[in-house]
Image (tube, rainbow, N blue to C red):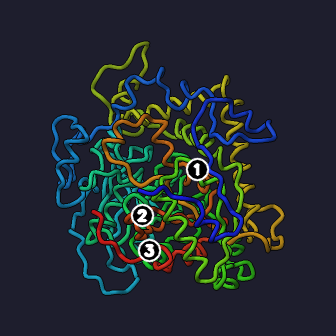
Amino acid sequence: MLRMRIRPIEHVVSAITLPRLSFTITTPRLSSAITTPRLSSAVTTPRLSSAITLRRLSTSNPTKTFRIGRRTPRRAPLAPSVSKPAAATQVCEKRLDTNENAFITPPKHGAHFEDNGLDEITNKPIAIKDNISTEEYPTTCASGILKDFQSPYDATVVTLLKEAGALISGKTNMDEFGMGSHSTHSHFGAVISTNGLSVGGSSGGSAVAVRSHPEEAWASLGTDTGGSVRLPAAYCRVLGFKPSYGRLSRWGVVSYANSLDTVGIFATEVARLEAVYDVLNQHDPKDPTSMTDRVRSRCENPGLRAEDSRRESLRIGVPMEYNISELSNDVREAWIKVLIRFKSVGHTIVPISLPSTQHALSAYYILAPAEASSNLAKYDGIRYGSRTKAPDGADGVLFSQTRGQGLGEEVKRRILLGSYTLSADAIDNYFVQAQKIRRLVQDDFNRVFRRPNPLDKDYPRKTNDRGVDIILCPTAPTNAPTLEDVVEQDSVKSYMNDIFTVPASLAGLPAINVPSSFFSLNGWSRAGIQLIGQYGDDRNVLAAAQDDELFNDYDDGDLF
């Protein structure tokens, strides 16, 4: 097979060479990324042996935390009944007719429907990720410690869907508490696709439900902390939209990282995304992080809306730092061809630089676990969750056995990581420096966009005529790995899947995954393409994803 060359990019954007950078995770101090004028091109975090991987703190080998069929789901007949942990190769060989274990709690009323062709959610089944509270169904977060938890109320987003006439069709499987990239860290067993490939995480069940169970999921809700909607959408080849932080209410959503969590939407058509988004896009006084009406009015200012004034000729930004050496040829070729299509219909392709985003992944895996270690402290079997019958731990520790048995290995690893980075000995060198990197990432995005950030203290300022309307880049550096590869990955390598999705999450920006496929002499090039907009510019992001012909040669069929 011929190796992909960068020349096509030069054809699209004159004089652009897209230098290949290496995004390897190494261990120098994060503080050096702040104090040194020239930032290193490597993604760096300090002493990851005791932080991210936590090999000395973990009680088991990280590669053994992936367990397919670890427990047969109590409520989900779709799940395979496996009495012992099965090897990934055995599960991949099953090749069942449908995707398995997408739902933890399947529909009570068999939410089948007849599509009337209208893009309205009335009488349409909407699947809900199992970390979003529902009064009708249990909310387990795919965790053993919450396996019997029944919420006494609906989350705001669920209430709004019901008021609009939607049918809540069931609760979808996920990585426990949203912590994972392949939907394999679930108390109820992994979400498994019949082609033996990863479905992404942590909202893998919601993505699979939309792709393979349309009679039960006209659309679905997930949550996106660092890419948990966009990555499954890329791997399952559906649309996955993460709105701006604060656009959709988080009230009733079980928190992983408060400053990052965002309710997202899956669908197979942009019109369906917009229909669900229109229902949920409103201020919620019960959510202190909900976007205020004042900020919403700024976002809808027609004088600053590229969709209104320049829709016929958008400026599309191409981040040079995203052309990394780990980018697969298929993904790079699809990225280039999408850029060519956008240029061919009159849009302008603009090279941009986002230097601080190279450090975003390191900052994310310090900030998110730090917040998680605090949020998950309440799950002790006393106030929340199931309590083990085993005796308490040594020295009178009341709930050590309950948390030890009720929480999965990946969750415990991140709690340990977060607790360490918040400790007195580490907070200055880890958490504080990661917050500074987050600010640098936000500043990079604000510098390259045409529209001003409505949260800017200097708002309103003039638009940046040399800025861009949309940033276009891959969603993930590679296509979906096999489950065998997932088993062999250590925790750090699995975190690399989030390298292109984390920057938008740190900045709170709207982003959407759009599946793309192009045919060439070497066969099909398929990839998830990510469109990122300025904060509050959600409509423009959805509008840019409307034209399917810009992303695909033609429908290449159902890959599942």
Q: Residue at x 61, y 40 (%)?
A: 362
Label 2 neighbour load within 10 Å: few <14, some 14-19, many 20+:
many
Amino acid type at image mark 1: Ile
Residue 167 position (above or below residue 228): below
Q: CA distance from mark 1 to mark 2?
A: 18 Å
Asked whether the beta carbons under mark 1 and mark 2 sit within 8 Å of each other, the answer is no
Which of the 4 image quadrants contains residue 448? Answer: bottom right
For the N terminus, the quadrant is bottom left
Disc 3: which residue: 552
Residue 149 in the image: x percent, y percent? 33, 46
Front residue of 136 and 426: 426
Task: Give neighbour class at mark 3: few <14, some 14-19, many 20+ (Cα, 10 Å).
Answer: many
Q: Residue at x 73, y 56 (%)?
A: 444
The image shows residue 266 at horizontal and vertical percentages of 42, 66
Residue at the extreme top: 395
In which quadrant will I find the C terminus? bottom left
For disc 1, the marked residue is 324
Checking the image for residue 526, the label placed there is: 2
Say if residue 247 shows up in the picture: no
| Number of residues whose C-alpha sits closer than 10 Å to that of mark 1, classed few (under 14), some (14–19) or many (20 or more) | some
Q: What residue do we see at 63% from left, 70% from top?
A: 11
> How many numbered discs?
3
For label 1, the SS is loop
The correct choice, above or below, for 251 with respect to 369 in the image is below
* Residue type at tag 2: Arg
Local secondary structure at mark 2: strand
Q: Is residue 390 left or right of residue 72?
A: right
| Image location (x, y in percent) of residue 236 | 37, 60
What's the residue type where badge 3 is placed? Asn
Q: CA distance from mark 3 to mark 1?
A: 23 Å
